[in-house]
Image (cartoon, grey):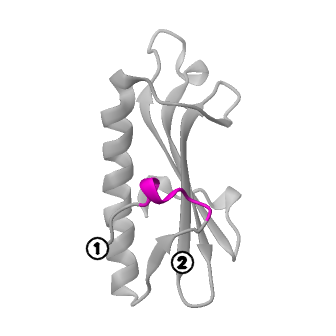
């Protein structure tokens, strides 16, 4: 799944993906920049996978902080999540596996099925 997968945050029961979609400001040195983006957890369930995702800020300490995405960054962040999710669907379909939104995810945030 390309640069989105973070092995160090994953386990056999859960896979962690994220995307630093939009730089807050290119003025600080590269190692001090912050980004708006998303992170997604894909959990193994009995007969499929369930996902839950969040939007937020990837801060200078390398930690995700859930927050609202400013309007000028929203399209880039949402588009990157949509592109990733389509790749995920294609990959899981090839493996004859399914994915659905976790029950804890608000229904209005569920991503479209294939």
Which residue is drawn at the image coordinates 55% and 24% (left, top)?
Answer: 34
Instruction: In this rendered view, identify the residue nearer to me: 50 or 91.
Output: 50
Q: Is residue 105 above or below residue 71?
A: below
Which residue is farthest top? Answer: 27
Disc 2 is placed on an element classified as strand
Local crowd size for mark 1, using a 10 Å CA cut-off: few (<14), some (14–19), many (≥20): few
> In screen coordinates, is 57 left or right of 84?
right
Locate residue 87: give its quadrant.
bottom left
Which image quadrant: the C terminus?
bottom left
Residues under labels 2 and 1: Cα distance? 14 Å
> In screen coordinates, is 99 left or right of 85?
right
Question: How many labels sit on residues?
Answer: 2
Q: Which residue is mark 2?
A: 49
Which residue is farthest front? Answer: 107
In the rendered image, residue 59 lying in the magenta stretch gets the answer no
**Residue 2 position within the rendered picture, expressed as x and y whole percent measured from the top left:** 42, 59
Disc 1 is placed on an element classified as loop
Q: Is residue 6 above or below residue 13?
A: above
Instruction: In this rendered view, identify the residue nearer to me: 100 or 89.
Output: 100
Q: Which mark is residue 52?
A: none
Q: Which residue is mark 1?
A: 114
Q: Which residues are magenta?
A: 104-110
> In screen coordinates, is 64 left or right of 55?
right
**Residue 11 position within the rendered picture, expressed as x and y whole percent measured from the top left:** 71, 70
Q: Is residue 17 above or below residue 15?
A: above
**Residue 84 position within the rendered picture, expressed as x and y whole percent measured from the top left:** 37, 57
Do the residues under discs 2 and 1 have CB atoms within 8 angstroms? no
Which image quadrant: the N terminus?
bottom left
Local crowd size for mark 2, using a 10 Å CA cut-off: few (<14), some (14–19), many (≥20): many
**Residue 39 position within the rendered picture, expressed as x and y whole percent measured from the top left:** 55, 49
Which residue is drawn at the image coordinates 31% and 44% (left, top)?
Answer: 79
Which residue is drawn at the image coordinates 43% and 23% (left, top)?
Answer: 70
């Amino acid at each position: 799944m390309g640069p989105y997968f973070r092995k160090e945050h994953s386990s056999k029961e859960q896979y962690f993906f994220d995307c630093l979609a939009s730089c807050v400001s290119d003025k600080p040195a590269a190692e001090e920049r912050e980004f708006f983006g998303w992170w997604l957890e894909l959990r193994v369930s009995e007969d499929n996978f369930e996902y839950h995702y969040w939007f937020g800020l990837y801060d200078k300490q390398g930690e995700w902080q859930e927050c609202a995405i400013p309007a000028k960054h929203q399209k880039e962040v949402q588009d990157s999540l949509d592109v990733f999710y389509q790749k995920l669907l294609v990959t899981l379909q090839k493996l004859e596996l399914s994915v659905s939104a976790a029950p804890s995810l608000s229904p209005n945030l569920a991503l479209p099925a294939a």
